[in-house]
Amino acid sequence: MTLPRGLFGPDLVDVAYEPWRAVGSTTLRLGPSSRAPAVKSDSGESIELAAGQHLGRQTTRNPGCLDAPPLRPAVEGFVWGYCLPPVTRKSGWMLLSDLVPDPALGRLACGPANADFDRRRPDACGGHCDGRPLTGERPLSGPARVSARDVYLRYAPGSTAFRYLVRGDEVRRLIQTANARWIGVEVRTARWTRRGARGWVMASTLSPIRQ
């Protein structure tokens, strides 16, 4: 079936990353604001970069499979990316003024799951222009509330994250994947994501709202 407007399959994502170095200690956050909570590791610790550590800064969604898609613009002075090892590979927002580009870094920025590509070396990671269209999706309807502490809003099922939803945020369900593990949603009310944004979340992170 045709996907609802604003929802995509893996064939229409193909983002890249490039390394930016922290100039001082800086925190990865759930939203593009200094008031947003820190992203937490699985053990509950706030995720931060120390001076000299790196964020893989994300590009725009890249359906044309360009080798060097433009970097995703800053929002309120924050940029989206993921922390490179040895820091936990979580994604989130980081203050742009705390970062500088580091194009000479020898380590590749292949994405938080090593499934994307490095904007400097598009053939090095093996994740460039390799997405496949979705098949077997089924329509879904009704409101739901986020029940997880926080959850990525993704461009495609199991694919690249670009925003966060947090516990208590409300969405409208639009469609689900054939295996029912992923649900395409539209944001109704959310703390750190604009109303009307669309993307995919894990079905297990939502609870239906009884009307």
Image (cartoon, grey):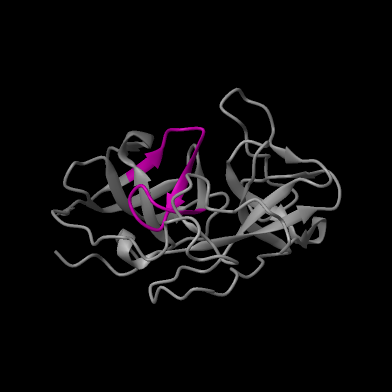
Residue at the top extreme of this rendering: 43
Up-down: is 63 above or below 167?
below
Q: Does the magenta stretch include residue 159?
A: yes
Q: Does the magenta stretch include residue 141?
A: no
Nearer to me, 1 or 103: 103
Q: What stretch is highlighted in magenta?
A: 144-162
Up-down: is 43 above or below 198?
above
Dividing the image into 4 quarters, which one contains the C terminus?
top left
Nearer to me, 206 or 112: 112
For the point 70% across and 53% down, the residue is 94
- Residue 8 appears in the picture as rendered: no
Residue 176 x/y as whole percent: 22, 49
Residue 76 in which image quadrant: bottom right
Horizontal arrangement in the rendering, residue 141 relative to residue 43 (left or right): left
Dividing the image into 4 quarters, which one contains the N terminus?
bottom left
Residue 171 x/y as whole percent: 38, 50
Horizontal arrangement in the rendering, residue 141 relative to residue 170 (left or right): left
Residue 37 x/y as whole percent: 67, 40
Nearer to me, 68 or 121: 121
- Residue 132 appears in the picture as rendered: yes
Residue 132 x/y as whole percent: 26, 60
Nearer to me, 131 or 27: 131
